[in-house]
Image (tube, grey):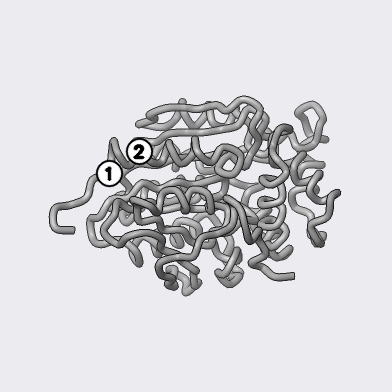
Amino acid sequence: MSRLMHVSSGPYAPPVPTRELTAVSADGARLHVEVHGAEHAPPVVLAHGWTCSTAFWAAQIRDLAVDHRVIAYDQRGHGRSPANPACSTDALADDLEAVLRATLAPGEKAVIAGHSMGGMTVMAAADRAVFREHAAAVLLCSTGASRLVAESTVVPLRAGRLRTWLTQHVLGSRAPLGPVTPLARRILKYGTMGPGSAPHMVEACARIVHACPRKVRHSWSRVLDLLDLDHGVRSLAVPTAVVVGTADRLTPPVHARSLVAALPNCVGLTELPGLGHMTPVEAPELVTGKIRDLVTTYATIKEGA
């Protein structure tokens, strides 16, 4: 099965990048990076979530690249970034720093948007010098800082030890996902998307998620199981907006509200009725609009850039 399996037409078909490059992380991990749009346009950096790839941001890239420089990268082991045995929140932060160094000029500011594990990447990097040098503002979509397994409602039981144990085994499964079948689409929709998600949205997400190698999926599930980035939230000093779907089973709204309470400079919480975990796909115009608003309000281009 191709690791780059994705839809080839419609709003979620990945656009062709203006250029591609490889960023090298602190431990030598190589990261596939795409740049879309004009080189001197306001920069936006997109960090995708667990089991996804740059293809996840197709709708945002297509819209924003008209008048922004959009930088998207594959997390290690995902998409076209080779797998690496080092899976940790420190590695996520190292990788984001490498991407920022490789794509932005010294002192250049960007709006950074992270979905799910991409949001956790931002939190992990919040106290890093390179992040602080380059981050103008942040959008956190469908993410959390800690207690991910305990708060997940993927398993429809009351909160407690049994639900947590079952959730660990469901999310940490080593089983291959196999081809994208009608049953696979129903399972993915239940676990990650709102009940009203259109079939083309479900198809796009299913193709991306099923393309993630099972060993990579399992390795990162262990990191998410033990996640504790509460300190990173308190260090995230730039203006930060938060988006969550009310039907999100993986990172329910309790996480977004905790983020808002802990962030030093929260500039808004948006709860989307009936939407699930895949907010950039389920509400593409809204997520894109939030990014645009952050660029307009907090990011500027230096004279002569």
Q: Amino acid at mark 1?
A: Ala
Distance from the alpha carbon under mark 2 to that under mark 1:
7 Å
Q: Secondary structure at mark 1?
A: loop
Name which quarter of the figure residue 102 lies in. bottom left
Could you tell me if the residues under marks 2 and 1 are in contact, i.e. CB atoms within 8 Å? yes
Is residue 237 in sight in this rendering?
Answer: no
Q: Position of residue 131 (x, y in %)?
A: 35, 52
Q: Upstream in the sequence, badge 2 or badge 1? A: 2
At horizontal 53% and vertical 62% (from top left) the residue drawn is: 74
Nearer to me, 268 or 207: 207
The crowd level at tag 2 (other Cα within 10 Å; few <14, some 14-19, many 20+) is many
* Mark drawn on residue 294: 2
Nearer to me, 25 or 81: 81
Q: Position of residue 146 (x, y in %)?
A: 58, 39
* Mark drawn on residue 254: none
Name which quarter of the figure residue 142 lies in. top right
Q: Position of residue 91 (x, y in %)?
A: 50, 61
At horizontal 35% and vertical 56% (from top left) the residue drawn is: 69
Task: Farthest residue to the right: give it.
Answer: 183
* Mark drawn on residue 299: 1
Nearer to me, 89 or 298: 298
Q: Which of the image's four quarters has the N terminus?
A: bottom right
Q: Amino acid at mark 2?
A: Leu
Q: Position of residue 229 (x, y in %)?
A: 51, 43
Q: Secondary structure at mark 2?
A: helix
Q: Which of the image's four quarters has the C terminus?
A: bottom left
Nearer to me, 186 or 66: 66
Is residue 279 in sight in this rendering?
Answer: yes
At horizontal 69% and vertical 55% (from top left) the residue drawn is: 209
Q: Is residue 139 left or right of residue 271?
A: left
Q: Is residue 53 left or right of residue 168?
A: left
